[in-house]
Amino acid sequence: MLLGRTANGLYWMFRYIERAENMARLLDAGLRMAITKTSDAPEEWSSVVVSAGVAQAFAQKHDSYTAANVADFLLRDAANPSSVMSCMEIARSNGRMVRTALTREAWESVNEAWMTLKKTLKKQVKESDLPAVLDQVKRETALIRGAFHGTMLRNEIFDFAGLGTYIERADNTARILDVKYYVLLPAVSYVGTTLDNYQWESILRSVAAHRSYRWVYSGDYRPAEVADYLILNGRMPRSLHHCYINIINLLDLLEKDYGTRTRCHETAAKIAGSLANQDISAIFDMGLHEFLTEFIRNNNQLGSEIAEAYNFN
């Protein structure tokens, strides 16, 4: 049975690795949207900051939403605890703390990613270099995940790391969808236009889903189908439903290992139930914003209950 401190280190190590990748994906989406709409580019960059959940912190440091300001804040600003570099620093710190719980390959992939990105992000990134830098962030985090999945024993160490990954991923997907629906679209009159379609495509790209979406749905990007894909499709690896299929499986394994079922198991089952056998039209009738707001709140509650159940400290 793992010490609570070790479980906590693994859980947060993988939450921050996932968050670093998500920041890069958000920036990538913002870059694509800003390119198509140069006159209102500040609005696009503002929506990226809002989606990242750091609007207040950004406003304290910058008075304009430019590509340079937003990219620097989300990539390398030490004052932003969710910047890519801050996330990698915290992930590596947690990795060092639980070093004996990791294979050599898993630890070295984290350490090498940190060293590589620290060198890349030592100075402000030029806008022309942004695509290559964002690809590098996504590549380094993928290498960590590959080393971990390819070498780690499937025990409670693996389970806590997976819980951190999927709770963070679900939070990110829900936030991206919510911001698109309420912030990115400038007016109702744009619904169904080329601009609207391109923004939905950008959101799908930010969760690496634009090509697989085409495999499932034919035709243009439709809000209901994009929402259905990112919320309810259990085969889409960044959908809310897929995340909760995995969260339930991991919590069931921990229940067997620890011999106890706690409040977090019931909360996870309730959230998973709200996603299984659900219909996207019912979600739209309820209100997409209301559904996503409740989901984010419940997902955060689950994270707190996991910490309590397994004595994170």
Image: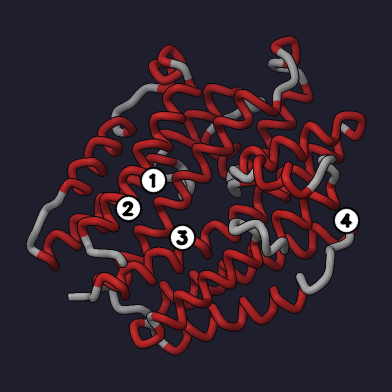
Amino acid type, label 4: Glu
Residue 219 can be seen, yes or no: no
First of labels 2, 4 by sequence position: 4
Q: Which residue is mark 2?
A: 246
Residue 118, placed above or below residue 77: below
Q: Nearer the viewer, mark 1 or mark 4?
A: 4
Amino acid type, label 1: His
User: Does residue 99 appear left or right of residue 60 in this picture?
Assistant: left
> How many angstroms separate mark 4 from mark 3 (CA)?
28 Å
Q: Residue at x 70, y 35 (%)?
A: 47
Question: Which type of secondary structure does the marked residue at label 3 adopt?
Answer: helix
Instruction: Please state which of residues 252 and 15 is positioned toward the viewer in this rendering.
Output: 15
Q: Which residue is mark 1?
A: 242
Amino acid type, label 2: Asn
Q: Which of the 4 image quarters holds residue 21? A: bottom right
> How many angstroms separate mark 1 from mark 4 (CA)?
34 Å
> How many angstroms separate mark 3 from mark 2 (CA)?
15 Å
Q: Residue at x 60, y 25 (%)?
A: 181
Q: Which residue is mark 3?
A: 15
Question: Which type of secondary structure does the marked residue at label 4 adopt?
Answer: helix
Percent position (x, y) of residue 59? 73, 42
